[in-house]
Amino acid sequence: MPQLAATPEIDFQSEQYKDAYSRINAIVIEGEQEAHENYQRLAELMPNDKDQLMGLARMENRHKKGFEACGRNLSVVADMDFAREFFSNLHNNFQVAASEGKIVTCLLIQSLIIECFAISAYNIYIPVADDFARKITEGVVKDEYLHLNYGEEWLKANFEASKAELEEANKANLPLVWKMLNQVDTDASVLGMEREALVEDFMIQYGEALNNIGFTTRDVMRMSAHGLAAV
């Protein structure tokens, strides 16, 4: 079967592309910054895993620098105000959970929702990225699977004690993902990223993570429905 050719019609230097990229690039930079700070906070809450969590935090910081370089490569200034507002609800929910010592909720937000959101976005972006950004993003996405794996393994080991809080945290936070996807629908389309593909990839990543932790397929379908109501 012949391989699909890369989309030649994307003009990485057009004003329309650069305008959309200023927001999408800011989102990935801010996403990595959020992750960097979240893993540092988790290291305080989980002293037994401090070294591993600080290692993840450092990795996220490297990713942020990589995506900043992607913006510089296209001479685009990232719209960081937009990105901070974009993440504000998830950011606030994480901060509240951390202040209450709710490790399970923090892990669901960072290690499942944010990591799955990132992985799905990067998977859909890589085939349509410029050469420089593609190389950076391919390296980053390999690391993100490690971060997802950390949260999965911890929650799997503590599944029975975590189950009720996970369901509650899912109900509160999953709908935010769909609102976030709706916000970037137009910009993602300019970059060649199809919304349906983003939604599908996220649902697959997130569903597999919940399944790996210990939820049944029926549980996963029920929990996923909380998000779909907001699509």
Image (cartoon, rainbow, N blue to C red):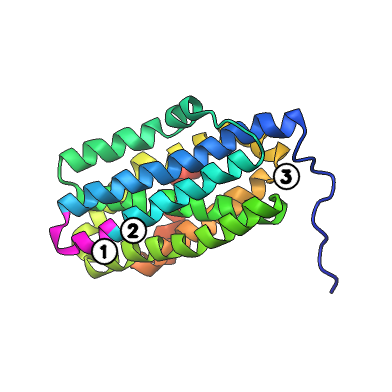
Q: Earlier in the sequence, mark 3 or mark 2?
A: 2
Identify the residue position indicated by label 2 in the image.
Answer: 56
Circle 2: element type: helix
- Residue 126 in the image, given as x and y percentages of width and height: 65, 55
Q: In the rendered structure, are the residues bearing label 2 and label 1 in contact, judged by CB atoms less than 8 Å apart?
A: yes
Identify the residue position indicated by label 1 in the image.
Answer: 52
Identify the residue position indicated by label 3 in the image.
Answer: 192
- Residue 120 in the image, given as x and y percentages of width and height: 55, 54
Circle 3: element type: loop
| Label disc, if present, on residue 64 of the rendered structure | none
Q: Which residues are magenta?
A: 46-54
Residue occupying the point 58% across, 37% down: 24
Q: In the rendered structure, are the residues bearing label 3 and label 2 in contact, judged by CB atoms less than 8 Å apart?
A: no
Q: CA distance from mark 1 to mark 3?
A: 36 Å
Relative to 134, is 173 on the left or the right?
A: left
Which numbered mark, 1 or 3, is in the foreground of this view?
Answer: 1
Which quadrant would the C terminus be assigned to in this image?
A: top right
- Residue 131 in the image, given as x and y percentages of width and height: 70, 54
Between 203 and 16, the residue placed more toward the observer is: 16
Q: In the rendered structure, are the residues bearing label 1 and label 3 in contact, judged by CB atoms less than 8 Å apart?
A: no
Residue occupying the point 64% across, 36% down: 21
**Residue type at tag 1:** Gln
Q: Quadrant of residue 226?
A: top left
Residue 223 seen: no
Answer above or below: position of 176 versus 64.
above
Residue occupying the point 79% across, 40% down: 11
Local crowd size for mark 2, using a 10 Å CA cut-off: few (<14), some (14–19), many (≥20): many
Answer above or below: position of 13 versus 131.
above
